[in-house]
Image (cartoon, rainbow, N blue to C red):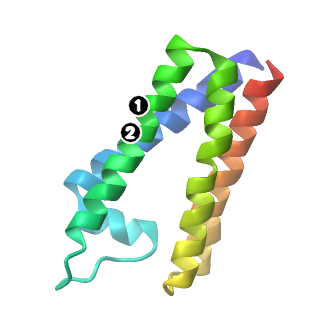
Amino acid sequence: MTVTAYTLAVGLNLFCLFLGYRFLFRPAPAAAGYGVPAEPGGDAGAYLAIKGLRDGTLGLVGLALLVFVGARAEAWFLLAVALVPLGDTLIVLRHGGAKAVAFGIHFATAVVVLIGAGLLFAL
């Protein structure tokens, strides 16, 4: 179970880094994949960059906690971070995004993050 817990935690943190990179450097496709595409004529660039910075920072903080503090700190971090994909679920639904994206991507991510937290708490 230890290998599974650590692998899932590292994978989730690396995924956050990937999302951050994607929103910073490939914002239009990232926004479409998020479930609420950016308006072509709007000033969504700043918001997409903010999301990229947020996601990338969460990934770095998660990795730092896991490496320098330990599994219990990472578990608490993941428990708190699960609020982000839950909020993303609501954002996609509120802004007319597809329910399949809201639940199949964002809500499912929240569930996986909570499973990761639970596994780390069990160590």
Q: Give, as a three-letter code, the residue at label 2.
A: Thr
Left or right, residue 18 beside residue 65:
left
Say which residue appears at 58% left-offset and 57% top-offset.
Answer: 85
Contact (Cβ within 8 Å) of mark 2 with mark 1? yes
The image quadrant of residue 7 is: top right
Residue 118 visible here: yes
Q: Give, as a three-letter code, the residue at label 1.
A: Leu
- Residue hosting label 1: 60
- SS label for mark 2: helix
- Residue hosting label 2: 57
Q: 74 or 3, which lies in front?
A: 74
Q: Position of residue 87 (x, y in %)?
A: 58, 64
Q: Position of residue 78 (x, y in %)?
A: 63, 38
Left or right, residue 66 beside residue 46:
right
Residue 19 visible here: no
Q: Is residue 80 above or below residue 66?
A: below
Say which residue appears at 38% left-offset and 39% top-offset.
Answer: 57
The image quadrant of residue 70 is: top right
Q: Is residue 79 above or below residue 73?
A: below
